[in-house]
Image (cartoon, rainbow, N blue to C red):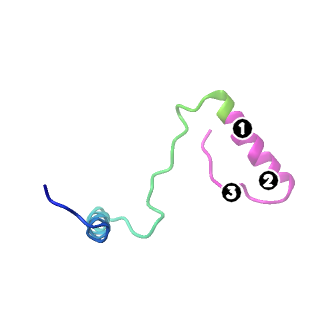
Amino acid sequence: MRRTTLKELGESIERKKAELGYSGQDYVVRNSGQYRTESKRALLRNIEAAAAERGEEPPFKANY
């Protein structure tokens, strides 16, 4: 069994991300929301509405 240090693992992940053309931390594909339950969709709408009432952007971008 080959042992891998966390440093080696991190370097390996960074190499793979570079090979795939990803950079930084903003590379995760956004969830489409296709399989969300109606209660989760309602929760996200309420969070967005509450932020809008305060004149703020919600802390996330949600597809629902």
Rendering coords of residue 28 (x, y %): 45, 55
- Looking at the rendered structure, the secondary structure element under dot 2 is helix
Q: Quick one: label 1 or label 3, which is nearer the N terminus?
A: 1
Give the amino acid at mark 1: Leu
Task: Measuring from the top left, give residue 50's x and y in whole percent.
Answer: 82, 48
Q: Is residue 26 left or right of residue 55?
A: left
Q: Are marks 3 and 2 in contact (CB under 8 Å)?
A: yes
Instruction: Choose between 40 and 64: the one closer to the eye.
Output: 40
- Image marks 1 and 3: residues in contact by CB distance under 8 Å: no
Residue wearing tag 2 = 51
Q: Which mark is residue 29?
A: none
Magenta region, residue range: 41-64
Residue 49 placement (x, y as % from top left): 80, 46
Decide which of tag 3 and tag 2 comes sooner along the chain: 2
Q: Residue furthest top?
A: 38
Residue 43: name its quadrant.
top right
Label 2, residues with CA under 10 Å away: few <14, some 14-19, many ≥20: some
Amino acid type, residue under disc 2 in the picture: Ala
Is residue 14 rendered to the left or right of residue 56? left
From the image, which quarter does the C terminus lie in?
top right
Q: Which residue is mark 1?
A: 43
Q: Which quadrant of the rendered structure holds the N terminus?
A: bottom left
Q: Nearer the viewer, residue 54 or 12?
A: 12
Q: Which residue is mark 3?
A: 59
**Residue 32 rendering spot, x and y as whole percentages:** 52, 41
State yes or no: residue 8 in magenta. Answer: no
